[in-house]
Amino acid sequence: MNHLSLYQLSNNYVQALDFLTDPDLDLPLAVVNDTLEGLEGELQDKAVNVAKFLRNMEATAAAIKTAEDTMTKRRKALEEKAKWLKDYIKANMEATGISKIECPYFKLSIAKNPAALELFDQTAIPAQYKHSETVTLEHIDKAALKSDLAKGQLIQGARLTNGTRLSIR
């Protein structure tokens, strides 16, 4: 089995096509066809194997994404449960007037938070504390540009291009 890369096989195919179809060589058509078919077969086999590897990578990436989503949900559930338990202990300590509990593992205590701002009526806030901002966002209507270009209009700074992509079905 030849272990040439897909790139090397592609180059070999193009070079063989150029060489074998040179009119000055006057090679028999059967020789040209046999050589090109052999190279094309190798190229196709290699491309299929690379595509199989690619599919495996895509499946692994999808499985990782699913695992990430599952782990994110689990993390959030644990965080919410931990917050609930913390609030539960705090509420019960406050209800009973106990401000401190000590054990060999840790110390629980009710602590005062730093002052926090609460805006309960924004319309009543004096003008000296209010600031206005004007933000201008520029947006290019890509759908309209594409439509007008497709109709044949020439628009400076934009054009339609046609690329290629690999489709694996």
Image (cartoon, helix red, strand yellow):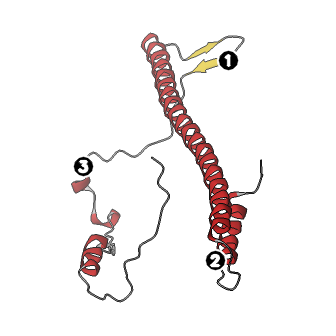
**Label disc, if present, on residue 121 of the rendered structure:** 3
**Label disc, if present, on residue 21 of the rendered structure:** 2
Mark 1 closeness class: few <14, some 14–19, many ≥20 residues within 10 Å: few
Which residue is painted at 31% across and 72% down in the image? 142
Identify which amino acid the numbered label 3 is placed on.
Asp
Which residue is painted at 72% across and 11% down in the image? 104
Left or right of residue 29: residue 156: left
> From the viewer's perspective, is residue 27 above or below residue 44?
below
Q: Please tell me whether mark 3 sits on a helix, a strand or a loop.
A: loop
> From the viewer's perspective, is residue 63 above or below residue 105?
below
Residue 11: x, y in percent? 69, 68
Mark 2 closeness class: few <14, some 14–19, many ≥20 residues within 10 Å: some
Which residue is painted at 63% across and 54% down in the image? 41
Pick whichever of labels 3 and 2 is earlier in the sequence.
2
Left or right of residue 5: residue 129: left
Name the foreground residue: 153 vs 56. Answer: 56
Name the foreground residue: 137 vs 141. Answer: 141
> From the viewer's perspective, is residue 119 above or below residue 62?
below
The reply to whether callout 2 and callout 1 are in contact (CB within 8 Å) is no
The reply to whether callout 3 and callout 1 are in contact (CB within 8 Å) is no
Identify which amino acid the numbered label 1 is placed on.
Phe
The span from disc 3 to disc 2 (Cα, nearest Å) is 85 Å
Pick whichever of labels 2 and 1 is earlier in the sequence.
2
Of tags 2 and 1, the one toward the viewer is: 2
Residue matched to label 1: 106
The span from disc 3 to disc 1 (Cα, nearest Å) is 41 Å
For the image, the number of numbered tags is: 3
Of tags 3 and 2, the one toward the viewer is: 2
Give the image quarter of residue 158: bottom left
Q: Please tell me whether mark 2 sits on a helix, a strand or a loop.
A: loop
